[in-house]
């Protein structure tokens, strides 16, 4: 079964950010799947996650996938810093911090200017994409009917920040680092260390105990898994881009907006969308407890933990059919 696809790049000119800094010549790369309904009522926004580009998310967009392009008009904006939209690798004067809110405000403007879309049937996201979905629901409560938050949170937790600060410190310690997340050359050794730190968090202890790092990849040893199967997911990206997106993640907070003044309870309470929270039971970044605490302040929400030992990766279950089936059913139920 075929469906329409399109892609492009939206130019903003110089874009003033939340901080007052300017992102010069700002541009947003995007892809779309499906057909926009005449009344624009079938829009699902699916922003990218950390280091991902739109093409990396293609696999779950299909009639038998998690998002059905024969029913929904699915728009995938590339997050700033991912190497396609404005990023340190293509923008020499990229600011020190581009926030999640900066991304969402630009996405809102893009949807209006490119498609005339001013309302979402759903904001769906995984990980940093889930943080963007949460921001959509908090910053534009009148414009979001549903939000599906897969392995994400409304505010980056302190424990999560420890992980991010370890990644940033690893890159900053590289001899090639010249300050501010910029590098004189790609820091090969630091990126190898970066990937290994990430591998300790992305999957659960039970996942490694079950030997899935070997059986799910075909690797013969732990080192082979880390260097040949895991690290390329990060070394394919520029270090400066990885640094910039880690900064965005570090500062993720739906309440960091003048209308909420840092009050997370108020920001959660302002959300009118129906929110489906889908944490993984074994996620080390975004544990179930974080979403459970948020749910107490949401008006219309449901918490459905993904029963998987794949840790954070259960929310992006390439090669994990049980988690994929769970997500597919949960999303289908929520979208109606």
Image (cartoon, rainbow, N blue to C red):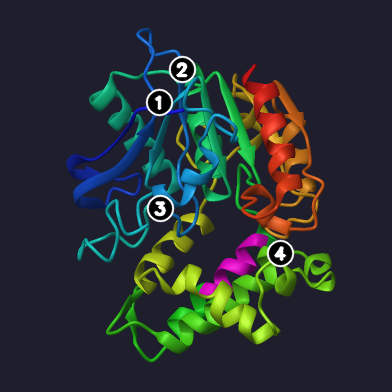
Task: Label 1, secondary structure: give it.
Answer: loop
Q: Do tag 4 and tag 3 residues touch (Cβ < 8 Å)? A: no
Residue 161 or residue 315, whichever sits in front = 315
Q: Do tag 1 and tag 2 residues touch (Cβ < 8 Å)? A: yes
Q: Quadrant of residue 273?
A: top right
Q: Residue 49: where, in percent of width, then height?
A: 50, 51
Q: What residue did someone put label 4 on?
A: 203
| Viewer-side label of 1, 2 | 1
Q: Main secondary structure of the magenta part?
A: helix
CA separation, marks 4 and 3?
A: 21 Å
Residue 108, numbered circle: none
Q: What residue did someone put label 3 on?
A: 53
CA separation, marks 4 and 1?
A: 33 Å
Q: Which residue is pictured at 84% across the width and 72% down the height?
A: 209
CA separation, marks 2 and 3?
A: 23 Å
Residue 254 appearing in the image: no
Judged from this view, the residue extending furthest toward the front is 1
Other-residue count near label 4 (Cα within 10 Å), few / some / many at <14 / 14–19 / ≥20:
many
Q: Which residue is pictured at 40% across the width and 53% down the height?
A: 53
CA separation, marks 1 and 3?
A: 19 Å
Where, quadrant-wise, is the C terminus in this rendering?
top right
Pointer 1 or 2: first along the chain: 1
Q: Which residue is pictured at 53% across the width and 28% down the height?
A: 68
Q: Do tag 1 and tag 3 residues touch (Cβ < 8 Å)? A: no
Task: Label 2, secondary structure: give it.
Answer: loop
Task: Label 3, secondary structure: give it.
Answer: loop
Residue 34, numbered circle: 1
Q: Which residues are magenta?
A: 160-167
Q: What residue did someone put label 2 on?
A: 42
């Amino acid at each position: 079964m075929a469906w329409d696809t399109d892609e492009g790049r939206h130019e903003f000119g110089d874009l003033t950010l939340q901080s007052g800094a300017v992102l010069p010549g700002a541009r947003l790369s995007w892809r779309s799947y499906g057909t926009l309904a005449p009344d624009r009522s079938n829009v699902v926004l699916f922003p990218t996650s950390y280091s991902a580009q739109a093409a990396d998310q293609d696999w779950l967009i299909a009639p038998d996938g998690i998002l059905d392009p024969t029913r929904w008009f699915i728009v995938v904006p590339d997050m700033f810093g991912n190497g396609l939209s404005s990023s340190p690798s293509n923008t020499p004067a990229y600011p020190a911090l581009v926030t999640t809110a900066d991304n969402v405000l630009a996405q809102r403007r893009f949807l209006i200017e490119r498609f005339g879309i001013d309302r979402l049937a759903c904001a769906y996201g995984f990980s940093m994409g889930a943080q963007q979905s949460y921001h959509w629901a908090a910053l534009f409560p009148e414009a979001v009917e549903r939000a599906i938050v897969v392995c994400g949170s409304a505010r980056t937790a302190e424990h999560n920040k420890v992980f991010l600060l370890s990644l940033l410190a690893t890159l900053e310690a590289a001899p090639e680092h010249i300050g501010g997340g910029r590098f004189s050359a790609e820091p090969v050794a630091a990126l190898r260390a970066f990937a290994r730190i990430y591998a300790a968090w992305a999957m659960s202890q039970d996942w490694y105990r079950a030997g899935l790092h070997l059986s799910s990849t075909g690797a013969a040893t732990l080192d082979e898994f880390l260097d040949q199967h895991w690290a390329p997911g990060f070394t394919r990206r520029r270090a400066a881009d990885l640094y910039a997106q880690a900064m965005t993640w570090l500062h993720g907070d739906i309440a960091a907006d003048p209308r909420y003044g840092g009050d997370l309870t108020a920001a959660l309470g302002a959300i009118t969308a129906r929110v489906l929270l889908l944490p993984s039971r074994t996620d080390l970044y975004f544990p179930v407890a974080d979403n459970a605490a948020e749910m107490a302040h949401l008006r219309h929400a449901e918490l459905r933990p993904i029963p998987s030992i794949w840790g954070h990766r259960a929310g992006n279950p390439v090669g994990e059919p049980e988690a994929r089936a769970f997500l597919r059913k949960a999303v289908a139920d929520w979208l109606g």
